[in-house]
Image (cartoon, grey):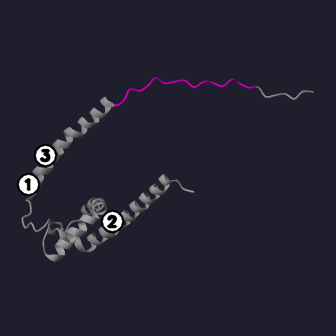
Amino acid sequence: MKSSTEAVAGILVDAAGLYLAMGIAVAAWIHWRGLARMDPGTRGAGIGFRILITPGLVALWPWLLVVWNRAVRGSGFQGGSAVSPSAGSLRIAHVWAWRILGILVPAALALLLVSRPPTSPPTTLPVPPSTSPETPSS
């Protein structure tokens, strides 16, 4: 008989599997039919771009269904925004994002290394006394 913890873990694993399966199905649908409709800037995007965004499509499929619904109804990309950012402004934003990440990631790693608990000195395991094989008595 399963314990309640095992039952809950089983339910969570099944739910995660279902979420993943739905995400893969929605991602395939979006790649096949909806990507250019949801965001016209993706027209003509190559296979590299599609591979790059696939994990995000799988993970964010519920939100993407909402965006797809808006695109089908004619509300446009991101809730009706008709203004697309220029390539120059996107490049500037990406440069700043990389600069910030270039500072935050090493700082976080250093903080984790400094705050980790001290390690105890290595301990030696006791050696069991050697036992000699019993000799049969004659």
Q: Is residue 5 left or right of residue 125?
A: left
Residue 4 included in the magenta stretch of the image: no
Residue 136: give x, y in percent of width and height.
87, 29
Q: Amino acid at mark 1?
A: Ser
Most extreme residue toward the right, as rendered? 138
Q: Secondary structure at mark 3?
A: helix
Q: Is residue 123 above or below residue 88?
A: above
- Give the CA separation, mark 2 to mark 3: 31 Å
Q: Mark 2 or mark 3, which has the lower sequence index?
A: 2
Q: Is residue 11 left or right of residue 102?
A: right
Residue 85: give x, y in percent of width and height.
8, 60
Q: Amino acid at mark 3?
A: Trp
Most extreme residue toward the bottom, as rendered? 73
Q: Which residues are magenta?
A: 116-131
Residue under pointer 3: 96
Residue 128 included in the magenta stretch of the image: yes
Decide if residue 74 is in sight here: yes
- Give the CA separation, mark 2 to mark 1: 31 Å
Residue 23: assigned label = 2
Decide if residue 43 is in sight here: no
Residue 128: give x, y in percent of width and height.
66, 25
